[in-house]
Image (cartoon, grey):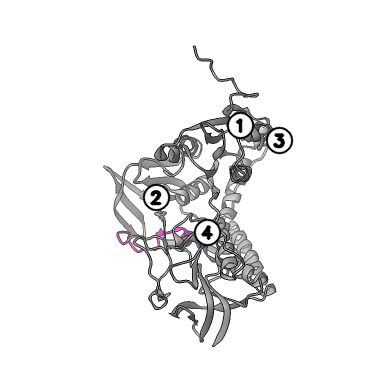
């Protein structure tokens, strides 16, 4: 039996930063992880998928090299080597997390955690059981891919984690679900020559983002990458055997070598025995927390995906740091509400703050300003002139409320927009801030000029009357 000021359950992007921050504040800290340090994001999510996407996008650019005056013949890929590189990147970062925890004096327990009471946590592995006395605790167990019961259990039916274990690519793939995960995998596989079909129950892909952004992405996926996208239909009568998978979408029968299921994620709370601590999940299966990360049990905090907030690694990290500081009694500060969202499709998408869609639902009066990458010198020079950036601002004050980018490096340049929105800048503030030329970030300045009716490198607004 060992006693700690703080015990963190889960060593993903919410848990391990929380453990490190609490240790920096002088607390004695333990962290319990049943699988691998770094959690889903590092081991079976963000990092391995983006490593593979980086390879597929490079191949796509090489194939287009002739348009930029370069001659490249016989470009091909070795997926097993790509998978090896992915594993190497994961192992390198996982070792980094291990060293960071060690350097900050955090005690790591490998095993499954469960509550005996609100202040007693059992860490159980194959070889031993340890009881930890916790002054306070943080639950950061994340989510797992949803695999509904109507799906056949077969090696040809996989979710994202299962797919990442493959050493060779199928010739054809069906993707069930047109959300972020499904679209990212579809773009990556199409760039590697896999015949792709996506089936989405809703009327469009990634329904949470604005319609103009969706249209740009879908157009590129269908026209440039050759992905077949079926929306507003269900995939029924799904079967799988040694020859492949089949399903019915409307009146059509679809066949492929593999079915990749991308139907969202569910919270991982099984086995924690929350009832022993006086806790229970809400009707949606998540843990309710206040703005400071506290559950209804005073000594227990929860962060990341299991709180039902944005299912994003960086949001989990921010919440973990807040919870750790609050648990250590420094001062109460709230979870950040300006959270960027990055989608690694082709083209990339970055969003932050309010969308036009959300503004309409809230009945808010807004104005927008947009600038096309096709009019931007750097994007043209790069050979990537597709997409645009868009500001959403208050109609009366011009305060920047939201930003959306679809196009080259959208996931990188969205950071500037996040800072501007958090700082409560107006469109004029942004427009009058000098941006280096030629850069992609200039698009934000140009879009701000357009929003306030003073466009420099785009056509002026039409005069009324």
Classify 10 Å Cα crowding around label 3: few (below 14), some (14-19), many (20 and above).
Answer: some
Q: Which residues are magenta?
A: 149-169
Judged by depth in the image, the label closer to the viewer, 2 or 3, is: 3
> Residue sitting at 73 percent across and 33 percent down?
437
Along the line of sight, the residue nearer the viewer: 322 or 150:
322
Mark 1 highlights which residue?
448
Residue farthest toward the top in the current orientation of the protein: 465
Along the line of sight, the residue nearer the viewer: 351 or 167:
351
In the drawing, what numbered circle is on residue 177? 2
Q: Position of residue 309 (x, y in %)?
A: 46, 56
Left or right, 193 with respect to 360, comes to right
Q: Cα distance, mark 1 to mark 3?
A: 12 Å
| Mark 4 or 3, nearer chain start | 4
For residue 251: magenta?
no
Using the rendered view, name the quadrant where residue 440 is placed.
top right
Using the rendered view, name the quadrant where residue 71 is placed.
top right
For residue 161: magenta?
yes
In the image, residue 126 above or below residue 209? below
Q: Cα distance, mark 2 to mark 3?
A: 39 Å
Left or right, 146 with respect to 442, comes to left
Mark 4 highlights which residue?
45
Judged by depth in the image, the label closer to the viewer, 1 or 2, is: 1
Mark 3 highlights which residue?
435
């Amino acid at each position: 039996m060992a006693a700690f000021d703080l015990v963190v359950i889960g060593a993903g992007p919410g848990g391990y930063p929380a453990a490190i921050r609490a240790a920096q504040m002088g607390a004695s800290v333990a962290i319990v992880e049943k699988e691998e340090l770094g959690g889903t994001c590092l081991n079976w999510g963000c990092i391995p998928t983006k490593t593979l996407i980086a390879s597929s996008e490079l191949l796509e650019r090489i194939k287009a090299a002739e348009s930029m005056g370069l001659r490249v013949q016989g470009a091909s890929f070795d997926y097993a080597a790509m998978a090896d590189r992915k594993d190497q990147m994961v192992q390198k970062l996982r070792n980094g997390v291990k060293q960071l925890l060690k350097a900050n004096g955090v005690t790591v327990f490998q095993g499954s955690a469960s509550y005996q009471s609100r202040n007693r946590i059992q860490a159980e592995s194959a070889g031993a059981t340890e009881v930890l006395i916790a002054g306070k605790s943080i639950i950061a167990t994340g989510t797992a891919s949803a695999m509904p019961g109507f799906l056949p259990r077969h090696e040809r039916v996989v979710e994202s984690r299962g797919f990442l274990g493959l050493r060779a690519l199928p010739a054809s793939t069906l993707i069930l679900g047109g959300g972020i995960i499904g679209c990212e995998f579809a773009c990556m596989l199409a760039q590697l020559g896999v015949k792709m079909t996506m089936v989405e129950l809703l009327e469009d892909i990634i329904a949470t983002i604005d319609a103009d952004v969706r249209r740009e992405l879908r157009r590129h996926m269908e026209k440039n990458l050759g992905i077949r996208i079926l929306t507003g239909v269900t995939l029924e009568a799904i079967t799988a055997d040694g020859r492949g998978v089949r399903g019915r979408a409307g009146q059509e029968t679809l066949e492929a070598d593999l079915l990749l299921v991308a139907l969202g994620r569910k919270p991982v709370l099984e086995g924690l025995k929350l009832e022993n601590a006086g806790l229970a999940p809400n009707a949606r299966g998540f843990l309710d927390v206040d703005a400071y990360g506290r559950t209804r049990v005073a000594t227990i905090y929860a962060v990341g995906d299991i709180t039902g907030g944005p299912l994003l690694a960086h949001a989990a990290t921010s919440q973990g740091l807040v919870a750790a500081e609050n648990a250590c009694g420094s001062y109460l500060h709230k979870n950040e509400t300006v959270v960027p969202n990055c989608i690694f499709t082709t083209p990339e998408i970055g969003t932050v703050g309010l969308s036009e869609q959300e503004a309409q639902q809230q009945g808010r009066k807004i104005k927008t300003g947009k600038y096309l990458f096709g009019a931007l010198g750097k994007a043209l020079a790069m050979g990537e002139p597709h997409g645009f950036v868009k500001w959403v601002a208050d109609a009366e004050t011009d305060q920047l409320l939201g930003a959306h980018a679809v196009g080259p490096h959208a996931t990188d340049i969205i950071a500037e927009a996040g800072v501007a929105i958090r700082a409560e800048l107006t469109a004029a503030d942004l427009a009058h801030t000098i941006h280096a030329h030629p850069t992609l970030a200039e698009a934000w300045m140009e879009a701000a000029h357009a929003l306030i009716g003073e466009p420099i490198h785009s056509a002026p607004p039409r005069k009324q009357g």
